[in-house]
């Protein structure tokens, strides 16, 4: 079991700050809530100054967060450059893509969801360029980058 502590989280729909913790057991998210101590037996991993969000999904091809971030962050940034709101652009690459592709358990950070996570430096809900500063990628709860 791991507990990822960060400054904020984008759950697929909205950003929440003020210190958060995402607890992962195996391949699934167990809880998302305020920062605290790791559960008994859990490893605490701190990402100060960072935001945790669901793995980005390229609705045209495949899940992007396979250890190689590829071009998808640039595509999301392009949506914002084209006038789409920051939150809508992030939702497009997470929750809405998972829904459109019928990928249950993907695209959101909530208990029971797949532990496919992207950790970026900064807050992409305020500055989309934060997607270009990945600090970690987790696939099914295992750190891949």
Image: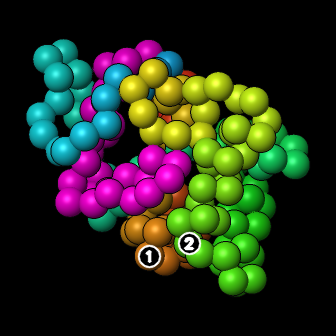
Name the residue carrying label 2. 86
Task: Label the magenta part by its dominant secondary structure.
Answer: strand
The quadrant in which the C terminus is found is top right
* Span shown in magenta: 1-26
- Is residue 79 shown to the viewer in this render? yes
- Asked if residue 48 can be seen in this view, the reply is no
**Residue 35, image x, y percentages:** 18, 45
Give the residue at mark 1.
126
Q: Which residue is at 32% across, 19% downward?
A: 1
Residue 9 in the image: x percent, y percent? 37, 52
Helix, strand or loop at mark 2: helix
**Relative vertical location of residue 10 with respect to residue 144 in this rendering, above or below:** below
Badge 1 element: loop
* CA distance separating discs 1 and 2: 7 Å
Residue at screen point 19% across, 45% down:
34
Residue 69: image tag:
none
Residue 73 located within the stretch drawn in magenta: no
Q: Is residue 8 magenta?
A: yes
Residue 101 appears left or right of 4: right
Q: Are marks 1 and 2 in contact (CB under 8 Å)?
A: yes
Q: Residue at x 64, y 65 (%)?
A: 89
Residue occupying image coordinates x 29% and y 52%: 6
Relative to residue 63, is residue 143 drawn left or right? left
């Amino acid at each position: 079991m791991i507990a990822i502590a960060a400054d904020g989280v984008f759950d697929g729909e909205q950003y929440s700050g003020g210190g958060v913790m995402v607890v992962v057991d195996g391949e699934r998210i167990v809880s998302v809530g305020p920062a605290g101590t790791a559960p008994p037996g859990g490893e605490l991993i701190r990402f100060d100054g960072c935001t945790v969000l669901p793995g980005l999904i390229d609705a045209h091809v495949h899940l992007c967060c396979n250890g190689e971030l590829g071009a998808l962050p640039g595509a999301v940034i392009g949506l914002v450059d084209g006038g789409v709101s920051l939150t809508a652009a992030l939702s497009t690459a997470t929750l809405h893509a998972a829904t459109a592709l019928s990928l249950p358990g993907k695209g959101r950070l909530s208990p029971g969801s797949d532990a496919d996570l992207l950790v970026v430096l900064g807050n992409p809900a305020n500055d989309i360029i934060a997607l270009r500063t990945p600090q970690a990628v987790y696939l099914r709860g295992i750190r891949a980058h």
